[in-house]
Image (spheres, rainbow, N blue to C red):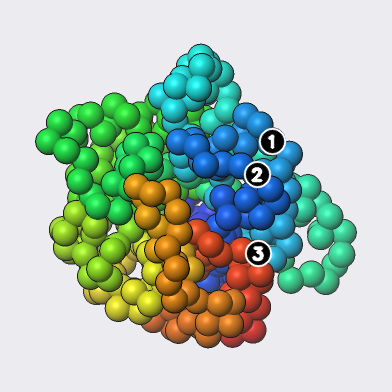
């Protein structure tokens, strides 16, 4: 019963949003626009240590733009990563909890303010605790290759994710967001952990894709979704941080393979060189294109739409505008 009750939180939001809720946009992108220096293995999570108020400010900017879901700043926040910075495990756990606390505080502050106006176009946002892939922790681009090496097996991945999952779940988010998962093995690890830890918070699992057809590992999405479909703890599946021009065909594919909600939040189409740690010049979607394609993605079956790297609050405003118009 607990799972069904909590899963309805996401179902209710999607219903209130007219059939498609808006996820926020690029978090690190917006931090950098405000001057944050995050070229670091911890990436955006560095601001949990150095500038937590900026994290809250960015959350508020996305809420003002119309986001129905805030994704926390914990994507690249891991206990081994914090320890490598000289922090203790206990300090690392407090920072993980802080990532949820900052998002909840921003959501509550914003909702209290807009709710004083009887006529407003916002929904009370949900907070999704971000759980980045093992490749995100490695910070070597392997979340876009799916190759973790011969020594990484199911148990190692579960051991890596377990304590972070426990801490984030205890911090009280509305959702859990497993992001940029590159292979079937890590999806399996996430699902088994949700069962083993008896997590009663609805989750989504998002894959990356570098060819628009398969997971980065080369495994088909049918193989990956066959694993996910066995879990009633995963409420939604989808794609994040892939180029937006991949999404139409992938949404069609996912609609055939699952009855779960479909969530998509692509990057701008620019290409990240994981080894050189820089964005390569490439054709990308502007806000007008996101506005145009968000309508198509929803029509094809996406129930949650947002943006990832190199998207901004103006991107989310464009997506929110067109989706709310089509309600």
Q: Which badge, 3 or 1, is on the more N-terminal residue? A: 1
Q: Which residue is mark 1?
A: 51
Choose mark 3 or mark 1, whichever is in front.
1
Residue at the image point whose x is 76% and y is 54% from the top: 111
Q: Earlier in the sequence, mark 3 or mark 2?
A: 2
CA–CA distance in space, label 3 to label 2: 17 Å
Q: Which residue is mark 2?
A: 36
Residue drawn at x 29%, y 46% is: 142
Vertical relation: 214 (above or below) 79: below
Task: Answer above or below: position of 322 versus 216.
Answer: below
Is residue 157 among what the camera can see? Answer: yes
Q: Secondary structure at mark 3?
A: helix
User: Viewed as shown, does residue 255 lie left or right of 271?
Assistant: left
Q: Is residue 187 visible?
A: no
Disc 1 vs disc 2: Cβ atoms closer than 8 Å?
yes
Could you tell me which secondary element the residue under label 1 belongs to?
loop
Dot 1, how many residues are within 10 Å of its Cα: few (below 14), some (14-19), or many (20+)? few
Of discs 1 and 2, which sits in the foreground?
Answer: 2
Q: Which residue is mark 3?
A: 313
């Amino acid at each position: 019963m607990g799972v069904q009750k909590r899963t309805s939180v996401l179902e209710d939001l999607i219903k209130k949003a007219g059939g498609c809720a808006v996820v926020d946009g690029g978090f690190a992108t917006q931090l950098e626009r405000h001057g944050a220096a995050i070229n670091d293995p911890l990436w955006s999570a560095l601001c949990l240590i150095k500038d937590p108020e900026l994290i809250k400010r960015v959350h508020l900017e996305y809420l003002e733009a119309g986001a129905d879901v805030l994704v926390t700043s914990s994507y690249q926040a891991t206990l081994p990563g914090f320890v490598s910075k000289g922090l203790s495990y206990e300090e690392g756990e407090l920072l993980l909890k802080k990532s949820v606390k900052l998002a909840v505080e921003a959501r509550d502050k914003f909702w209290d303010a807009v709710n004083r106006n009887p006529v407003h176009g916002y929904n009370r946002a949900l907070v999704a605790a971000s759980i980045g892939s093992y490749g995100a922790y490695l910070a070597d681009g392997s979340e876009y290759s799916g190759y973790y090496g011969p020594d990484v097996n199911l148990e190692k991945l579960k051991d890596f994710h377990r304590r972070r999952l426990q801490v984030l779940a205890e911090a009280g988010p509305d959702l859990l967001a497993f992001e940029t998962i590159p292979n079937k093995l890590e999806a399996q690890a996430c699902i088994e952990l949700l069962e083993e830890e008896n997590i009663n918070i609805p989750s989504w699992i998002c894959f990356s894709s570098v060819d628009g057809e398969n997971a980065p590992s080369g495994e088909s999405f049918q193989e990956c979704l066959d694993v996910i479909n066995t879990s009633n703890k995963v409420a939604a599946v989808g794609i994040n941080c892939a180029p937006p021009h991949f999404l139409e065909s992938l949404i069609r594919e996912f609609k055939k393979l699952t009855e779960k909600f479909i969530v998509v939040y692509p990057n701008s189409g620019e290409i990240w060189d994981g080894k050189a740690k820089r964005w390569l010049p490439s054709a990308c979607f502007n806000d007008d294109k996101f506005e145009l394609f968000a309508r198509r993605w929803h029509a094809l079956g996406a129930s949650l739409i947002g943006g990832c790297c190199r998207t901004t609050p103006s991107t989310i405003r464009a997506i929110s505008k067109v989706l709310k118009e089509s309600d």
